[in-house]
């Protein structure tokens, strides 16, 4: 056990943060486990209904730095692929709609090329006085 006051406090803080992080981790891991069981049992519709809850839990873990944001995105992407491969078109179609809307919203704008300016002559070197 630490003797210094600040070290004792750090032990307390670490303990409470670990408990809090464990709760968040367990919540998304249990949801993923249930999701994978539903996929294995060919209950794809129920799995698709569970997917938004999983997204929310994984986003929360990513936001709280329990998961790295890229790891959270990777997990969500892989779960979405499982649904899409299983045959539910709802999740895949929603992603395609977003992509098509994004293309419609952002028009392609071309900017005219700037003309190159004429270079100024180099400044004359000053000679040192003797």
Image (cartoon, grey):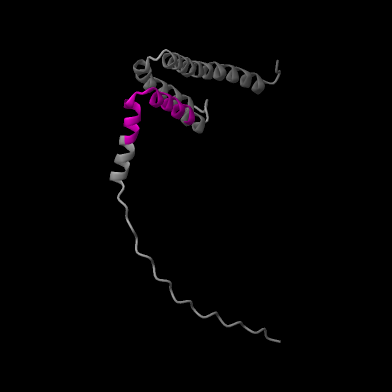
Q: Position of residue 46 (x, y in %)?
A: 35, 15
100 or 64: which is nearer to us? 100
Quadrant location of the N terminus? Answer: top right
Residue 71 point in image, percent of width and height: 51, 30
Position of residue 65 relative to residue 121, above or below, is: above
Left or right of 64 in this view: 98 = left
Which residue is located at x 67 percent, y 83 percent? 128
Q: Is residue 78 magenta?
A: yes
In the rendered image, residue 6, in percent from the top left (x then y), is placed at 65, 23
Work out whether residue 32 or residue 87 is closer to the camera in this orientation and state it. 87
Q: Main secondary structure of the magenta part?
A: helix
Quadrant of the snapshot with the C terminus: bottom right
Q: Position of residue 53 (x, y in %)?
A: 39, 20
In this rendering, the answer to whether 21 lies above or below 95 is above
Residue 42 position by quadrant: top left
User: Which of the pair 43/68 is nearer the observer?
Assistant: 43
Quarter of the figure with residue 57: top left
**Residue located 45% across and 24% down the image:** 58
Q: Residue furthest bottom?
A: 130
Q: Which residues are magenta?
A: 74-96
Which quadrant would residue 92 be assigned to in this image? Answer: top left
* Total numbered circles: 0
Which one is nearer the viewer's eye here, 120 or 98? 98
Indicate whether residue 90 is drawn in magenta.
yes
């Amino acid at each position: 056990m630490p003797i210094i006051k600040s070290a004792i406090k750090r032990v307390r803080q670490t303990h409470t943060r670990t408990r809090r992080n464990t709760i968040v981790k367990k919540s998304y891991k249990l949801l993923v486990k249930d999701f994978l069981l539903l996929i294995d049992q060919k209950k794809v519709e129920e799995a698709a209904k569970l997917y938004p809850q999983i997204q929310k839990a994984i986003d929360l873990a990513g936001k709280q730095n329990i998961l790295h944001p890229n790891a959270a995105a990777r997990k969500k992407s892989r779960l979405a692929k499982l649904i899409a491969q299983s045959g539910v078109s709802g999740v895949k179609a929603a992603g395609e709609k977003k992509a098509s809307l994004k293309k419609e919203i952002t028009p392609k704008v071309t900017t005219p090329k700037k003309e190159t300016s004429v270079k100024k002559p180099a400044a004359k070197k000053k000679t040192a006085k003797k």
